[in-house]
């Protein structure tokens, strides 16, 4: 099995836990405040990972690359907005429906990758995107 596939599957498993644990944790809390606290926990955890891996020396390299840093900051803002809306959605809706609509991010990412990055998509890829869209809508709205 390819390394990228193992990482992607682990990402999917932990994303599922985010939804379930988040729904339970948000029962009587403000979603935005809870998301902010979650973000602090994530930041501390990831800083710990960088320290454990001995990669603190690479921080300067990231900060020195202004173009890359700009896109990393913009990605962070997009991620924060995604999580704010995600936690609001799971607080007010059913996890099984919210996660399916959230998975439309795959469709949006493919479309944006083709338009903005010039990536090519095969006929099979197009069919897959159409099936993901149909499946997400059927599960979420059905």
Image: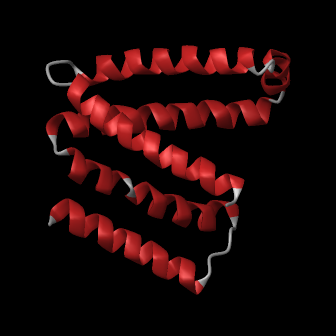
Q: Position of residue 60 (x, y in %)?
A: 83, 18
What residue is rendered at 23% in x and 45% in y? 95
Residue 111 falls left or right of residue 63? left
Give above or below for 110 relative to 24. below
What residue is rendered at 70% in x and 53% in y? 3
Q: Position of residue 104 (x, y in %)?
A: 39, 59
Quarter containing the C terminus: bottom left
Give above or below for 19 relative to 134. above
Q: How many marks?
A: 0
Q: Position of residue 68 (x, y in %)?
A: 75, 36
Q: Nearer the viewer, residue 12 or 90?
A: 12
Q: Residue furthest front?
A: 1
Residue 70 falls left or right of residue 16? right
What residue is rendered at 49% in x and 38% in y? 78
What residue is rendered at 51% in x and 31% in y? 77
Q: Residue furthest bottom?
A: 123
| Picture quadrant where residue 67 is located | top right
Q: Position of residue 16 (x, y in %)?
A: 37, 43
Q: Nearer the viewer, residue 12 or 33?
A: 12
Give above or below for 86 relative to 113. above
Q: Nearer the viewer, residue 110 or 7?
A: 7
| Picture quadrant where residue 57 is located | top right
Quarter containing the N terminus: bottom right
Residue 49 falls left or right of residue 41? right
């Amino acid at each position: 099995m390819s390394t990228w596939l193992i990482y992607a599957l682990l990402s999917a498993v932990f994303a599922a836990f985010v939804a379930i644990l988040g729904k339970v944790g948000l029962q009587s809390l403000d979603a935005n405040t809870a998301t902010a606290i979650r973000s602090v926990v994530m930041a501390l955890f990831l800083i710990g990972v960088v320290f454990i891996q001995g990669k603190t020396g690479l921080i300067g390299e990231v900060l020195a690359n202004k173009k890359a840093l700009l896109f990393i900051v913009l990605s962070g803002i997009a991620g924060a907005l995604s999580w704010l809306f995600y936690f609001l959605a799971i607080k007010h809706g059913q996890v099984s429906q919210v996660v399916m609509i959230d998975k439309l991010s795959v469709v949006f990412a493919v479309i944006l990758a083709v338009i903005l990055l010039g990536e090519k998509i095969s006929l099979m890829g197009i069919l897959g995107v159409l099936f993901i869209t149909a499946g997400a809508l059927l599960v979420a709205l059905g």
